[in-house]
Each structure stands twice: as C-alpha cells, then as structure tokens.
Image (cartoon, rainbow, N blue to C red):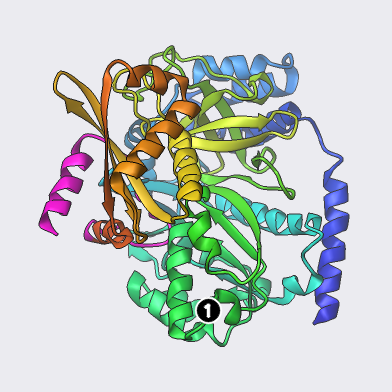
Amino acid sequence: MALLGSMLKNGIRLTNAVRLRKMTAFKQQRKAFRKLISKARFTEFGTTYHFEELLSSTEFGTQREFYEKYKQIVPIHDYNSMFDGWWKRSLAGEKDIAWPGRVKYFALSSGTSEAASKYIPVTKSMSKAIQRSSIRQILTLGRYQNLPSTLYEKGYLMLGGSTNLNAREGHFEGDLSGITASQIPFWFQRFYKPGREIAQERDWALKLDEITEQAGSWDIGYIVGVPAWIQLLMEKIIARYNAKTIHDVWPNLMVFCHGGVSFEPYRKGFEKLLAHPITYIETYLASEGFIAYQTHPNAEGMQLVLNNGLFFEFIPFNEQNFTSDGELVANPQTLMIDEVDEGKEYALLISTCSGAWRYLIGDTIRFVSKKRSEIVITGRTKHFLSLCGEHLSVDNMNKAIELVSQEMGISIREFTVAGVSHDTLFAHHWYVGTDDSVDASDLRDRIDAKLKELNDDYAVERRHALKEITVTVLPAKTFYNWMESRGKMGGQNKFPRVLKKNLIGEWENFLKSL
C-alpha cells in the first residue's frame, strides 16, 4: 500500500508540472464557451437564441465577437426565469430543452434564505465535470510538501446529503452532495467514508450518530464538509470515545476540505479539537457546478475552473447594476475574465453544461489575483446590509467576527444580522452564537469598532443614520435548532448571515417560543 501512495504522489507532481503549461484565462474561457454552445445548439434553448450563429462567431469571428453577440442575443436569467421558461419542462421529463437529452437528476437547493426548494438540473455532463474537478483538486495536494504519500491511502470522509435520492416522475432529486456521492467512481469506493450504507441515511441526526459509532474503526486522513457540521461531528466523536482531540481517534487526519461558508469564524473553535495543525483547502462547489478551488499552499483565494464545462461573466456589484435590495437592474454591465480588476466585487453569472445560461447564481466574489484567476467569496447579492448606505458585506461581517473572537479568546460558532428601524432612522441587530461566557455590551462595542475599521461607509453612517447596534448572545445550539425546525439540517445547509424580510419575523418568533 505504501507503493500506491508513492505512485500517486509522483503522478500528482507530474500532472501538476504538465498543467502549468496552459492557455491564458481568456482562451480557456473561449474554448469552454465554444464547447457549451456546440453541444447545446440543437436544444430548444439553443435554437431559440441562435446558438449556431454564436458558434460561427466563436470559430470564425474576431477575438471578442462571440461574447458581444452572446450579450446581445441571450438575456440574463435568475432562477425563476430559468426554471419557468425552461427547467420546469426538463423536470417534467421533456428532453433537449436547455441541454441535450433528458435530465435524470435535480439538486434541491434553497440557498440560505428562500423557503421553497429550487430544482437545479444535474446532467451527465455536469456530473462528469464535477468528478473531473474533484480529482484535479485532490491532485493539487502534491504541491503541499508537508503531506506524506501515505495520505493517499487513508480514508476520505465526505459529510453530505443522503445518497438515497427521492425518485419522482422519471427523475431523482436530493442534495448535490448526495447525488455526487451516489456516483463515486468504483476505484474510489475503498477510500470513501462513511460508506454506502450510512451515506443512504436521510435522518441527519441518525447519520451523525452512525458515523460516530463507526469512527473508531476508520483511519481518516481527509475530511470534506461544511465547517459547522464537521465541527459538531468531531465534538460528538471526541465525546463518544472519551478523547481529548480528534487526533486521538484519527491520528492520520491531515486535511480538511471546506466550503459553503467562510471558515474563519469557525477556526478558533475548530482548532481546539485538534492535537496538531492540519492543512485546510477551500472549495467553491455550488448546486450549479464546481466553480473554484484552492490550488496551492497559502493561496489567498480559490482558482476559478475555467476549462471544465463553465463559462463565467462578471457584473460589477455597484449601484449602477444593483438596487439597494440587491435586485439586478435592466441591461447591467457584464465582463469576461480578462476585463475584471483585482480588489473589486462582482456578482457571478454562469453558463454551464447543465443548461444554465447567463445565470445569476446569487454570489458575489472579489479577485485577489487576476493572473491566477483566484477569487474569494464575499457574500450574496441579497445578503448584505445597506439600510442607509453602510454597504456592509458578509465579508466584512466574517472578518469582524474573526478578529473579535481572537481578541476575546472566544469561539463564535454562528451569527446573523438583521437590519431594523430605530425611531425614524436605522439599526443593526446582531445575534451571536457562542457557548463561551461573554459580556454582550463588550462584544457589541468590539464588533462595532472592527466594522468601522473595515468599512469606511459603515463608519460614516454610524455617525449619521445608523444610530444603534444591538447584540444578543445565544447558545450555539439555538441556531441549529432553528434550522432543524425549518427542515434545514444537513451537509449543504447554512445559517443565513443576514436576515431580511420574512426571515426576521420567523427568527424572532422562534426565539420567543424558547
């Protein structure tokens, strides 16, 4: 088995060396666009929006002609317009609608705010693309010199949704993590944990219990999941085996691959569960596709997947393109990968091999390296607070919580913020989840001070229209209990960082019922 690990690591190094010789970001995206348009040109979407003409422009036109025509011909879609116009027909079993063939799988996704489930198509092409990106991500481990070859022989624990998908009217539906886990290649089965039987479990609490009971017999080297749920699972395992740290149970645990939310607010509490440092790798895997992942040690951000079934566009996230409620204006400015600037925020548009076209995914990103096409996720188009011009992003909130946690020596497991009225002006109400003893007034003052340092607009509005900041400290389990009450337990569910509209009342009513 040691020979297998050595061969894998050497193969990884060779693969990484070959991958360094690649096309520019623009050329990769042009090639990805051509493949998407060529494949979908005979679908109903493709014939409606003249994909044959777009393909001709890509192959025979000037360098940027294809993109100018794409912007002119194909409208921008949000979920409602994409589903109502096209995907609901695929859901009903029709073929060749927005992507060739029938769609067999649909990922159920509600993000962090909407109550109703969204049905996101997961085509065969998308499943293969996700597998390719997942393998490429594993291959990047060869760049981490601190990781021994024995890592590649250890168990890979993937904490996600049930692989026992719901069969409905000719298709299957469930969490994307459940769909992808149900399609794991045969050669990977021997490494995959929790294994087929436990992976099928739909009851999230029972699944965690079953994993905990089996954990002592596994040799885990690599874990994948949303930070909050992985932390809860490790705490259960440590308690079950009367251990001091997770390394007492899994001594060879070396890598945590995380995504979905910023890891920084969780880091302090997470690392208390470890006996020694491990390697962290960030990913950006959404229901709509595998968008980006960290490709080298100490990377500032994640590298966009430019050559695997995804075409990206970027909308500057500013007042010219979005309303104060995060709604997209008519005819916004859109850019390709070579037109963006570092340090600026953009809303992400994607066209994919699942039949999403100019689709507003709802996330906002910032480029930290244009040369490497590396990004960080800064929030959601509708998950920011700007009641009076404070322009407070989730990125600002995460950073403030991280800094305050370090200063106070506490672990903040969850938090959320609501914008509320205050007399004739405005206020922010923070709800902070921690099991450590903390003075709410001190916490409030520290968060407020950090946000003033991080965001000039916030500092200005705190002197004018943003008159009050309130902090309510709650046990961390309160946040998870609310998610459970909404049927949102599970590997891909996250607590919303910003509460707006109906969610504010729902959350407040829940707290009153306790």
- Quadrant of the image for the C terminus? bottom left
Rendered location of residue 53, percent (x, y): 60, 20
- Quadrant of the image for the N terminus? bottom right
Rendered location of residue 415, percent (x, y): 35, 47
Tell me which residue sits at (48%, 60%) in the image. Answer: 269
Q: Is residue 7 left or right of residue 339?
A: right
Q: Residue 144, relative to residue 219: is it above or below?
A: above
Tell me which residue sits at (70%, 59%) in the image. Answer: 138
Visible residue check, residue 260: no
Mark 1 residue crowding within 10 angstroms, few (<14) / some (14–19) / many (20+): some
Q: Hey, which quadrant is residue 144 in on the image?
A: bottom right
Q: Hey, which quadrant is residue 57 in on the image?
A: top right
Q: Nearer the viewer, residue 319 or 300?
A: 300
Rendered location of residue 208, percent (x, y): 41, 74
The residue wearing badge 1 is 244
Q: Nearer the viewer, residue 317 or 449?
A: 449
Tell me which residue sits at (17%, 26%) in the image. Answer: 422
Visible residue check, residue 24: yes
Q: Is residue 390 left or right of residue 361?
A: left
Total count of labels: 1
Magenta stretch, residue numbers: 485-514
Residue 493 lies in the magenta-colored region: yes
